[in-house]
Structures are given as C-alpha cells and as structure tokens.
Amino acid sequence: MPGPLTGRRIVLGVSGGIAAYKAVDLCRRLVDAGAWVAPVLTPDASRFVAPLTFSALASEPARTSLWGGPEPIPHTRLGQGADVVVVAPATARVIGAYAAGISDELLTATLLATRAPVVLCPAMHTEMWEHPAVQANLATLRDRGVHVVEPGVGRLAGGDQGPGRLAETDEILAALERVLGPRDLEGVRLLVSAGGTREPIDPVRFVGNRSSGRQGHALAEEAASRGGLVTLVTTTSLPVPAGIDVVRVETAAEMEEAVLGRSDACDVIVMAAAVADFRPKLAAEDKIKKADGVPEVVLEPTTDVLAALGRGRRPGQVLVGFAAETGKLRERATEKLRTKGIDLIVANDVSAPGVGFEHETNAVVLLGGDGTEQQVGLTAKREVARIVLDAVCARLGRGGDSSGDDSTERG
Ligand code: CTP
C-alpha cells in the first residue's frame, strides 16, 4: 500500500560514528517503503561501513565525495532533487558544520544545497551530546526548521551507557513520515500577524514592546510548508521565504487596517502580534527637545483587532489569539478566549526563563474554546507553530492532531 514515503526522494546522509551500521537497516527499510534512496557517506562513515553495502541496498550508488564522481556538482543535484534529507547518524562535526554553514565535504554541501526538510538523528557519546556547543548548534538548527530526532539512552561504543544512542529505526521512519506527511493546509488561506507594534511619540521615539516576531514568522513558515496560502502581516524586518505574501506594518492602526481589510478572505487568522493597547494621542511632528522639559505623553486606546475579528467573523473561520501573561496564565487566557470570541488561545508566561519575547524558544498552553487544553514544554518556536497548526487543522476538519504527543522529536 502506498504510504507517505512511497515515491519520495530521500537523501540518506551517514556520518562517521559506530551507529553508521544501523543506517544500513534504515536504508533497506526506506527502500521497502517505496522511497528512492540516495546514500551520501562522509569519509569517516566509510571507515565504519563500506559504501558498497549502501550501494547494494539503495536506489542509486552511494556517494562519498564532491570530487571524482560521474557528475561535476553532485551536491546541488542531490540537494535540489530531494524531498527530504535525513542524516543518521549525525555526528557533532556534521551538526556543527551545518549550523555554521560550512560545506567541507559532500554531505554538508548537500545539506546547504537543499531546500527540502532536513531530519537530523544525532548519535554520539553522552559528554559530546550534552556539550553546550552541540546543544547550541542544535538549537540554531531547530530554529531554522530542522527536525531533530533525539537520541535514546542506552549502550554506547566502548561499553559506556547514557544518552547519545541513535534513535530506533522505527522512530526515524515515523519522523520522516510525519515530515513528508500530507500537506494538510493545502489551499487554506491563512493570515498571521507578527511582531510588536511601535506607536510614535515623535519622529524618533516610540512606545513599543519586547516582541521579536519570531513566533509569528515561525507560524507563517510552517503554514506555508504545509501548503497554506499565507499572508504575513509583520512589524519586523526578519527575512521571509518566497511564497509568503508579506505586508510590513509598524503601528497598531496599520496592523488593524492590514488585518481587518483582509480578514473576509481568510479561513484562518492567527494573531501572534503584540499589538499595543495604547498609543500616544498625538505624535509630535518634530523631535521633542530635551531643553523643552519633560513632555507629558497622553495615551489613548487602540482597537482590539482580535476582538473585532471575533465579532465580525464569517462562518467556519478559525481565529487564534495569543496571551502573553506574567501570572494567572490559565485564568487570564481563558478569559481572553471568551471575551474575544475566538477558537483557540496560545498562552505563555513571558516571565518564565526561555519563554516568549526575545527568545528562540517558547513554552505554551493551548486552550480551546471547546474546553481542550494542551501543554507544550520549552521547545523551538517552529515546533510550537507545528503544534498550533495541528490544532487549527483539527478545527478545520483536516485531520490534524491537536493531542498527539511525540516529545521524542520535540526535544
Ligand atoms: N490583540 C489585538 N489587538 C490589540 C491587542 C491585542 O488583536 N489591540 C490580540 C493579540 O494579537 C493577541 C491577543 O489579542 O492575540 C491578546 O493580546 P494580549 O496583549 O495578551 O492581551 P490584551 O487583549 O492586550 O489584554 P491585557 O492587556 O489585559 O493582557
């Protein structure tokens, strides 16, 4: 029976660790599942397992070098043609080179030459796995959307025990199936807002907040990668991948106009932006001079965009809000869910370490208008995006799973 791996082109990267022998089984299982498998071995991997072993099992001969093969530029052909690149085992060196953008051999060159999703399956000794440099590199890669299948705990080379053992083949296959799974937002029109608004006091000063916009951008990118037609209304200048329609705004009023003006055409609206609740009533035309004394800044309320969406929503539209709190998280978020008339609220305690504003990571609670609740521990913002969009898909009746817990891949 065809499955998510059938007919997919998979580059299987193998780097130099003792777990390289397990990649042979992975290779065979991928071929059995109907995938086209192109193995790429690092020079060190070839010390553990002969390239011939992979060549005999895979869909095409194993490659081990940028040089001397039949094609002049193998990494771009492999990278461009792949539906997914999986590296199992991924050593600390490969992880480090990939995070730093160094293409020192065929596998790292292929990783940099691909726009396909990448799944890394690290395997190394516990001391190396727990080293802050390795963890920092993985955090960087996760933030870029790379999937990491965490190693297990068990016997390591040399008789040592501990975390660092390559994940089981079944786990790696499950991760690949999920990455290549159905494009469950195909054709769905989504609007995502991101970043903190800036409300001018004068031409050089503003009232702002600490939102970086990263969570909203991660939501937009994840939605697009699942086939969604995405408009991102953002206050940031962060780069946005091709295929996402970007509207750059600065103030709450511009955000209001951009969002409300497009809302009728949207199936899903996710308000991840930190919209100012108050703005200076009057912004000075010229810079306020210090010599003129301390100015009195009078504030006025802005429109609550999300509440306006909740009042004017069209049938079937899914509305998602965020709640940034510094205490009484559930209570306050539940109240916002109710008063704003939305389907789902993503609540985070922004006073907790590593959470929310200015961080690469987030920890949230997803509360549904139907009483559902899902806790997501500290993880990459892209992973939070994936979970939020699973919940959105479930509400759209598109087979998303808002309750599944596959923390092995979440890290
Ligand atoms: N929001 C909005 N328009 C505003 C303020 C907030 O659309 N003027 C949206 C945010 O994008 C977010 C949600 O409302 O999705 C909650 O924002 P938050 O700042 O946590 O709550 P507030 O409504 O501002 O309430 P409070 O100040 O009491 O926390």
Image: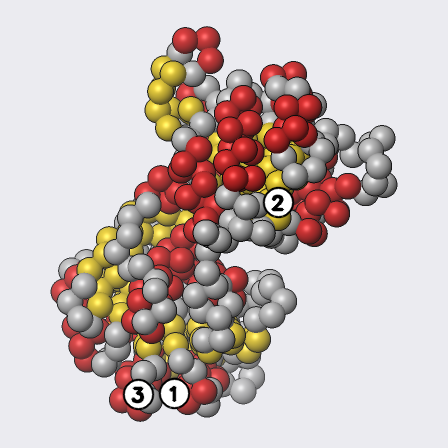
Q: Is residue 328 left or right of residue 96?
A: left
Marks 2/1: CA distance? 62 Å
Give the image location of residue 366, x and y in percent: 26, 61
Q: Is residue 404 left or right of residue 54?
A: left
- Marker disc for residue 263: none
Give the image location of residue 287, x and y in percent: 55, 79
Give the image location of residue 78, x and y in percent: 70, 45
Numbered disc in front, either 3 or 1: 3
Whether ligand 1 has any atom under 8 Å from the Cβ at mark 2 is answered as no
To which residue does mark 1 refer? 281
Q: Is residue 93 above or below residue 279?
A: above
Q: Quadrant of the C terminus?
A: top left
Give the image location of residue 394, x and y in percent: 31, 67
Dot 2 falls on a residue whose secondary structure is: strand
- Marker disc for residue 36: 2
Question: Which quarter of the picture shows residue 199?
Answer: bottom left
Please, what is the three-letter code of the amino acid marked with disc 3? Pro
- Marker disc for residue 315: 3
Residue sitting at x 57%, y 75%: 245
Marks 3/1: CA distance? 36 Å
Dot 3 falls on a residue whose secondary structure is: loop
Numbered disc in front, either 3 or 2: 2
Q: Is residue 389 left or right of residue 204?
A: left
Question: Which quarter of the picture shows residue 93?
Answer: top right
